[in-house]
Image: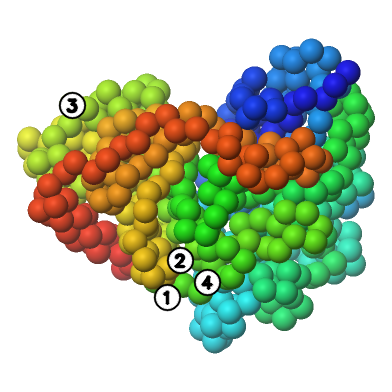
Amino acid sequence: MRADYVLALDQGTTSSRAAIIDREGGMVALAQREYPQGYPSPGHVTHDAEDIWESQLGVAREVLQAIPGGAAGIAAVGIANQRETTIVWDRASGRPVAPAIVWQSRVTADRCAALRDAGHASRVRALTGLPLDAYFSGPKIAHILDSEPGLRARAEAGELCFGTVDSFLTWRLTGGRSHITDVSNASRTLLFDIHERRWDAWLCEVVGVPMAMLPQVRPSSALLAETDPGVLGVSLPIAGIGGDQMAATFGQACLSPGMAKNTYGTGAFALLNTGTAATPSEHGLLSTVLWQLGESGEMVYALEGAVFIAGAAVQWLRDGLRAIERSADVARLAADGDRSSGVVVVPAFVGLGAPHWDPEARGAILGLTLGSSVADIALATVDAMAYQVADVLEAMALDAGGALGALRVDGGAAVNDALLQFQADILRVPVERPRVTETTALGAAFLAGLGIGLWSSTDEIAAVWQLDRRFEPQMEQSERDRLVERWQRAVERTRGWAAS
């Protein structure tokens, strides 16, 4: 049987997805399963890694039923994953030794503050492109090792493995034969020298992570591993791995320097391709690795701004305030809101990410009056996504030395026309939505297909991308400036709240 399809595994913060992608970049099948979140203390978020695995395996097997021959029709497997989420497991049994610490968790904020106080921040940023923040994996690993007697000694003896979610999934898919990650995920750990493309001994020592537990770092697109035939029915090549935002950038065909995308997911993540040069940021952004194509390919870098809470704020409307029954209902409710009411929501539930990096900030609703409505709060919650993305892209333009030409968007909220129009108005640049908005899965598929030759070049991949709609700025400049100034005042009132 001819293998014409790619199986893309898109493992996210609140759900696992799997998709079948054909040679034309079309989505043949898609399945999704949510799984539980853990909130053991304020600001701390955990997952059960077994829930991640079971949900991801379940949707993979589900979509394979949609093509003739099932797994026999798959040319390659690509993996995209929630980044920074940290899993430590037993090398012999493959079982996690503690709950996974999610990228959103602030449980290591004090640990990071101690490293900053010790004077390590400058050297860490020079090597990794990252600030010393609880967002990243390394301090999470150290926290897990110190959470139970004996774990650190076992890690030093090589009995424990660390991995971001891609690494854990690959371990399970290969029956424990492959302990690997790709350059994009490695670049999010605070342990990886993004210039030398290697784990750094000094970083590991300072952060407190034994090098014996780290995975081998591989390209993002190449023949990386083979699945165990008992998992999906046949042995399949794993040929693409990328952190979800890097995969989405690839799926958006932002393949040339100067191209940018934003994904509206649980958080919001804007990335600007800077080519083969790592651009240091002076405005609160990250310098990070986008991908490496092939064993001998050069690493491609990006400037990134990470917003911790975007779609998660809509989930809060649904589950916390019970203002809506389904997340999709927010557009209808927000349409009844009035922006002139003055209500502003700053969803700093787990602190503020780029460009502020304030772990002590907390969420707030400001501007309430007796005339304020739930619809006003819903509208302000949706607007907060656009404001936060605009803050990031303004910093990006300052670092890159030029204004953005256009922004490609994807993710769950990208179906919301009102949000995208407001985003264009606030940014003052066009916003472009592709026909296929599942660009994270698409990017994972492209990386894998390129890795085994299903697609011959990035030019062939770029030709697949198609525009659905382009949103042009329409708002008067004076109104835009008034709204942005109000937003900025609201953000300032949330800063440092948890420290008071």
Element marked by disc 1: loop
**Which mark, residue 282?**
1
Lower sequence index among marks 3 and 1: 1
**Which mark, residue 336?**
3
Q: Which residue is mark 2?
A: 285
Q: Amino acid at mark 2?
A: Leu
**Position of the N terminus by quadrant:** top right
Lower sequence index among marks 3 and 2: 2
Observer-side mark, 4 or 1, equals: 4
Element marked by disc 2: loop
Task: Report the side of 389 relative to 147 (left or right).
Answer: left
Neighbourhood count class around disc 4 (C-alpha, 10 Å): few under 14, some 14–19, many 20 upward: some
Looking at the image, residue 346 lies above or below residue 279: above
Could you tell me if the residues under marks 4 and 3 are in contact, i.e. CB atoms within 8 Å?
no
Which residue corresponds to the image point at 70% horizontal and 45% vertical from the top-left?
A: 457
Task: Report the side of 283 relative to 459 (left or right).
Answer: left
Which residue corresponds to the image point at 92% horizontal and 46% vertical from the top-left?
A: 177
Q: Quadrant of residue 264?
A: top left
Q: Amino acid at mark 3?
A: Asp
Q: Which residue is mark 4?
A: 279
